[in-house]
Image (spheres, rainbow, N blue to C red):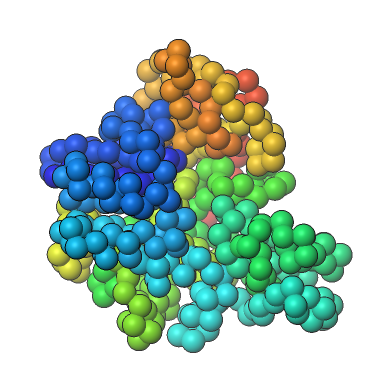
């Protein structure tokens, strides 16, 4: 069966790498892909928002499975577009329709959904430019720190944790008055700051049944010790030491199952991945956010731990047999470190030649491309802020991190930067 993966990042390279291991996958295409996906699949120069051309390609090249990586096309309604085409009714599409994608596309929608269905989350209120003064009054009586979130998609950067009123006032002004995040900031959710430690849970669901995938913890800040600006993600660790069976039972009972019941109750069909950003507050899970696709860089940490055939998992989704699917998971730790362009997440240059990719990787390591492209001179160059994700595997988190750091040190370009303290905050949970 021919497969099309939509997207161009490290997540899509990891998906292509994993699906390529299946004997059931014939040709794998990635639109638009990167220099890494070209090693395991065929890149197709079609933008992720060009639904018409993507649908035409699916028809022309006899594609039977479409896996949608990033959030933008999902929120934009790509799954609806495919479902509405009579000539594509036979195609298995992995990714929710627009109604379900609102869980990520609108923070206000997701908070209302959680509130309605009794899913534990932080207290909040939503404001617009017309209620700017009320928002300031709300902040004046709020405890600090406080969290401000742009309502719409902001590439993982639309969240500000303000330590005092002045910081919160400035952030609110930038979002609502200066439109720092464009239309994504037309609404701003102001919510209480939850004290705890984060992790990410992932399921694949048809809206009724689900398979729980390995959990992960990602690291968003650019600087070591979680300092500096938010990024799209600087690294990830899986498994998460404190996410034991008892804690994950709470996640299932208090978060996952009420979420699926809520979707059913509200008449929202859902088929695809659901990523639940959680805060562990003294042993209890609270939802920070929903994402309607796999995370990046978490995908690069969790897919290497999944021993099951990903193609067969997607087939079980299509056949509504997820309840009977037995997911095999490698018990080893996986740690991912992102190599980024100098200056990221602010101004950075593209087109830097990447060195070291031609050398064999150290044992128990993998390399996933994100912001890369193949130059006319057949060199791999940087083409984004987050450029390369390296994943190390090991019997312990420490060994996995040692392996990942060895691979990271081998790959260089002018201005290259990466965090060397991924997983630092989890050592207290290790025996």
Using residue 177 as the reference point, say whether residue 394 is left or right of it: left
Using residue 215 as the reference point, say whether residue 354 is left or right of it: right
Whether residue 403 appears in this view of the structure is: no
For the image, the number of numbered tags is 0
Identity of the residue furthest to the right in this view: 166
From the viewer's perspective, is residue 291 above or below residue 372? below
Identity of the residue furthest to the top in this view: 377
Quadrant where the N terminus sits is top left
- Residue at horizontal 53 percent and vertical 43 percent from the top: 235
From the viewer's perspective, is residue 191 above or below residue 64? below
- Residue at horizontal 24 percent and vertical 61 percent from the top: 85
Estimate the x, y position of residue 32 in percent, counting from the top left.
Answer: 39, 38
- Residue 141, picture quadrant: bottom right
Estimate the x, y position of residue 420 in percent, counting from the top left.
Answer: 60, 35
Whether residue 230 appears in this view of the structure is: yes
Estimate the x, y position of residue 218 in percent, counting from the top left.
Answer: 52, 50
Using residue 204 as the reference point, say whether residue 218 is left or right of it: right
- Residue at horizontal 18 percent and vertical 58 percent from the top: 87
Estimate the x, y position of residue 267 in percent, counting from the top left.
Answer: 34, 82
From the viewer's perspective, is residue 65 above or below residue 395? below
- Residue at horizontal 37 percent and vertical 41 percent from the top: 46
């Amino acid at each position: 069966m021919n497969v099309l993966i939509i997207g161009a990042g490290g997540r899509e390279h990891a998906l292509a790498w994993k699906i390529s291991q299946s004997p059931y996958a014939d040709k794998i295409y990635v639109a638009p892909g990167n220099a890494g996906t070209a090693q395991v699949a065929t890149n197709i120069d079609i933008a992720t928002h060009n639904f018409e051309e993507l649908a035409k390609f699916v028809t022309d090249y006899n594609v039977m499975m479409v896996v949608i990586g990033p959030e933008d096309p999902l929120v934009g309604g790509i799954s609806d577009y495919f479902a509405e085409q009579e000539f594509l009714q036979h195609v298995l599409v992995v990714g929710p329709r627009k109604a379900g994608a609102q869980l990520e596309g609108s923070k206000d929608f997701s908070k209302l959904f959680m509130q309605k269905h009794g899913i534990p989350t932080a207290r909040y209120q939503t404001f617009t430019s017309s209620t700017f003064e009320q928002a300031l009054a709300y902040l004046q009586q709020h405890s600090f720190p406080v969290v401000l979130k742009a309502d719409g998609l902001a590439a993982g950067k639309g969240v500000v944790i303000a330590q005092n009123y002045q910081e919160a006032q400035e952030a609110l002004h930038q979002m609502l008055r200066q439109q720092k995040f464009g239309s994504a900031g037309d609404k701003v959710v102001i919510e209480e700051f939850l004290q705890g430690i984060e992790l990410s849970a992932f399921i694949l669901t048809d809206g009724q049944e689900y398979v729980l995938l390995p959990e992960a913890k990602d690291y968003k800040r650019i600087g070591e010790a979680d300092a500096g600006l938010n990024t799209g993600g600087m690294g990830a660790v899986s498994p998460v030491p404190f996410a034991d069976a008892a804690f994950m039972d709470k996640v299932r009972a208090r978060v996952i199952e009420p979420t699926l019941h809520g979707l059913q109750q509200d008449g929202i069909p859902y088929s695809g991945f659901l990523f639940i950003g959680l805060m562990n507050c003294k042993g209890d899970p609270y939802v920070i956010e929903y994402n309607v696709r796999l995370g990046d860089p978490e995908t690069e940490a969790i897919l290497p731990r999944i021993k099951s055939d990903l193609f067969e998992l997607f087939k079980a989704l299509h056949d509504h047999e997820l309840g009977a699917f037995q997911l095999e998971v490698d018990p080893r730790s996986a740690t991912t470190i992102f190599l980024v362009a100098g200056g990221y997440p602010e101004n950075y240059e593209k087109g830097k030649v990447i060195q070291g990719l031609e050398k064999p990787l150290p044992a128990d390591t993998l390399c996933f491309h994100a912001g890369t492209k193949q130059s006319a001179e057949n060199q791999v160059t940087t083409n984004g802020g987050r450029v390369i994700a390296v994943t190390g595997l090991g019997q312990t988190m420490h060994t996995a991190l040692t392996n990942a750091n060895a691979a990271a040190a081998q790959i260089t370009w002018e201005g290259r930067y990466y965090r060397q303290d991924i997983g630092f905050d989890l050592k207290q949970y290790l025996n």
